[in-house]
Image (cartoon, helix red, strand yellow):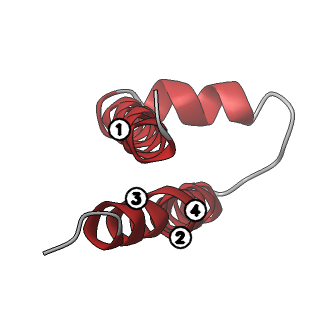
């Protein structure tokens, strides 16, 4: 397995995790909020903001560390 293939698989795996997080957040938001409020006192607005910011940070991190290097290596390693 080469580095380009590895980066592509990592990007796909991370986007699957992000999609799962979004799906759980959308479908089971009430349960998820009750679960988190066992430990932390969060208003619904704070809870939403934290998850939205977390998803945005995760997505940007995946783009920077996996997708961009994948694209650069893929399109610069093959001569035209």
Sequence-first disc among 3 and 2 = 2
Disc 3: CA contacts within 10 A as few (<14), some (14-19) or many (>=20): many
3D distance between C-alphas at marks 3 and 2:
10 Å
Q: Are marks 3 and 2 in contact (CB under 8 Å)?
A: no
| Residue at point 33%, 73% (across, down) | 76
Name the residue that disc number 3 marks.
Answer: 70
Q: Is residue 32 left or right of residue 35?
A: left
Q: Secondary structure at mark 1?
A: helix
Q: Are marks 4 and 1 in contact (CB under 8 Å)?
A: no
Sequence-first disc among 3 and 1 = 1
Sequence-first disc among 2 and 1 = 1
Q: Secondary structure at mark 3?
A: helix
Disc 2: CA contacts within 10 A as few (<14), some (14-19) or many (>=20): few
Rendered location of residue 48, percent (x, y): 52, 58
Q: Are marks 2 and 4 in contact (CB under 8 Å)?
A: yes
Between tags 3 and 4, which lies in front?
3
3D distance between C-alphas at marks 4 and 1:
12 Å
Q: What is the quadrant of residue 36 in the picture?
A: top right
Q: Secondary structure at mark 2?
A: helix
* Numbered disc total: 4
Q: Secondary structure at mark 4?
A: helix
Q: Is residue 77 left or right of residue 62?
A: left
Residue 65, which numbered label?
4
3D distance between C-alphas at marks 3 and 1:
11 Å
Between 8 and 42, the residue placed more toward the observer is 8
Name the residue that disc number 2 marks.
Answer: 64
Rendered location of residue 54, percent (x, y): 60, 59
Is residue 15 positioned above or below 75 on the image? above
Q: Are marks 3 and 4 in contact (CB under 8 Å)?
A: no
Q: Is residue 24 left or right of residue 49?
A: left
Name the residue that disc number 1 marks.
Answer: 12
């Amino acid at each position: 397995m080469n580095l380009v293939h590895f980066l592509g698989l990592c990007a796909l795996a991370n986007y699957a995790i992000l999609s799962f997080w979004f799906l759980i957040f959308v479908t089971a938001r009430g349960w998820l909020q009750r679960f988190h409020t066992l430990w932390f006192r969060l208003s619904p607005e704070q809870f939403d903001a934290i998850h939205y910011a977390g998803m945005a940070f995760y997505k940007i991190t995946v783009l920077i560390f996996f997708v961009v290097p994948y694209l650069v290596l893929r399109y610069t390693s093959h001569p035209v």
